[in-house]
Image (cartoon, helix red, strand yellow):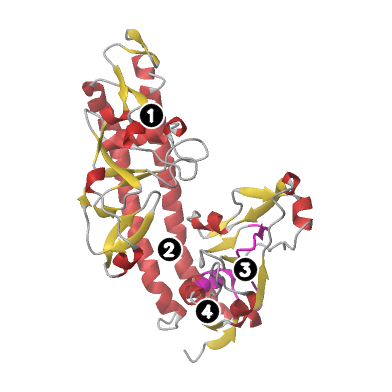
């Protein structure tokens, strides 16, 4: 650590807060200026962020104290939830839920700054204060003390960690393409019926479908295991820290030392976050040992439908018609029974599964590789950031 020095963040860069234009004037929104919120960072899976759910107009920008952040700025969510970090991939601005760090490039490498803030995010979050909600102030951020090496060493450290994240991001993009391929094949077979055009068709409530096929509900091809779910409070999970994922409606919420399920399953959001803007449900294709809470339906395919087929089907299905609840959206088992779908013969399903399963085998291998890479990155991060490992 002799080559490292102790500095305040404010001495090696600027802390910049964000702002929100008045929502009463719709002309403040819908422009071309990227405007980022903590929610945008919470669903961002990569180091960089370029835009969020909404843009603001030049009028909206000028109507408040918003500030443009240059490319390479480090966005840090400072209001609940605290601690999400990303790098601005382009010039953009944020709402008031941020205290972003604009590094002095003569003293701080941008990528190193990103990993430095990720490494310190929990400690910074613990410095938050407030009665209505917790928030880290600009002064707290500016006065926060970190240890940094010289600029050349910063770049070397960032290069090691960045290479791992770059591979993870490349793998994620490949898996997106593989899932899109699987969905396109599914649509070709079971929506457009392209391989079956030369067969007789018959009329159903869903239109003309190949002879021998039926119409049924989602529950005719999906077996639900919701009765086995058991929610755990955050306090309970605190005493159960381990290696098995604990799933919520849309993502992994924690890792614990016990599991309920072991195998390949499909999770679909039951309440809270249940449907995307395009009407498709939130899905998680999972395998291995895990524990789900009670905000996600747990299911597998049945009656010839594999779990992979079920995933492809629901990935392209608009479920907005079965969502209930005004304050808290919900997809119940009862409403799922009203969702009709085409059910092909078991022989067709068997043939299709021989095509689709190898694609999902690759998806699994890539995600498992990413887990290993992320584990290596997370092991190296604190050791590199403390100077324990020399480059």
Q: Judging from the image, what secondary structure is the residue with disc 1 in?
A: helix
Q: Give the range drawn in magenta.
A: 90-117
Mark whose residue sits in front, 4 or 1: 1
Q: Quadrant of residue 239?
A: bottom left
Q: In which quarter of the image is residue 213?
A: top left
| Residue 62 position in % (x across, y down) | 79, 57
Q: Nearer the viewer, residue 179 or 326?
A: 326
Do the residues under discs 4 and 1 have CB atoms within 8 angstroms? no
Which mark is first along the chain, 2 or 4? 4
Give the residue drawn at x 79%, y 51%.
59
Res. 21 in view: yes
In the image, residue 150 sits, relative to residue 83, either above or below, namely below
- Distance CA(mark 3)–CA(mark 2): 24 Å
Left or right side of 236 for 106: right
**Residue tagged by mark 2?**
164
**Residue tagged by mark 3?**
100
């Amino acid at each position: 650590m002799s080559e490292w020095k102790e500095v305040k963040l404010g001495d090696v860069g600027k802390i910049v807060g964000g702002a929100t234009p008045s929502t009463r004037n719709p002309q403040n929104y819908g422009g071309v200026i990227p405007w980022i919120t903590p929610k945008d960072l919470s669903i961002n899976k990569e180091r960089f962020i370029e835009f969020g759910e909404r843009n603001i107009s030049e009028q909206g920008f000028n109507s408040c104290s918003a500030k443009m952040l240059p490319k390479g700025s480090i966005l840090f969510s400072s209001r609940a939830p605290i601690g999400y970090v990303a790098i601005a991939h382009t010039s953009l601005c944020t709402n008031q839920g941020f205290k972003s760090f604009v590094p002095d490039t003569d003293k701080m490498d941008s990528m190193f700054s990103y990993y430095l803030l990720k490494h310190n995010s929990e400690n910074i979050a613990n410095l938050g204060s407030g009665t209505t909600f917790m928030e880290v102030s600009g002064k707290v951020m500016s006065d926060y003390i970190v240890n940094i090496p010289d600029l050349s060493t910063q770049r070397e450290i960032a290069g090691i960690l960045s290479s791992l994240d770059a591979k993870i991001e490349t793998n994620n993009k490949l898996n997106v393409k593989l899932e899109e391929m699987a969905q396109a094949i599914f649509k070709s077979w079971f929506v457009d019926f392209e391989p079956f055009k030369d067969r007789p068709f018959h009329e159903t409530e869903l239109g003309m479908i190949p002879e021998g096929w039926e119409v049924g509900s989602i529950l005719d091809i999906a077996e639900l295991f919701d009765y086995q779910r058991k929610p755990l409070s955050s306090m309970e999970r605190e005493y159960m820290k381990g290696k098995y994922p604990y799933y919520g409606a849309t993502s992994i919420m924690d890792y614990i030392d016990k599991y309920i399920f072991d195998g390949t399953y499909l999770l679909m959001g039951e309440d809270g976050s249940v449907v995307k803007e395009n009407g498709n449900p939130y899905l998680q294709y999972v395998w291995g040992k895990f524990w789900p809470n009670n905000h996600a339906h747990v299911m597998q395919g049945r009656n010839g439908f594999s779990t992979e087929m079920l995933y492809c089907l629901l990935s392209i299905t608009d479920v907005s018609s079965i969502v209930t609840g005004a304050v808290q959206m919900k997809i119940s088992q009862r409403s799922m029974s009203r969702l009709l779908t085409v059910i092909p013969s078991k022989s067709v399903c068997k043939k299709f599964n021989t095509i689709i399963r190898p694609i999902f085998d690759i998806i699994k291998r890539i995600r498992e590789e990413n887990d290993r890479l992320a584990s290596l990155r997370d092991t190296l991060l604190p050791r590199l950031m403390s100077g324990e490992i020399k480059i």
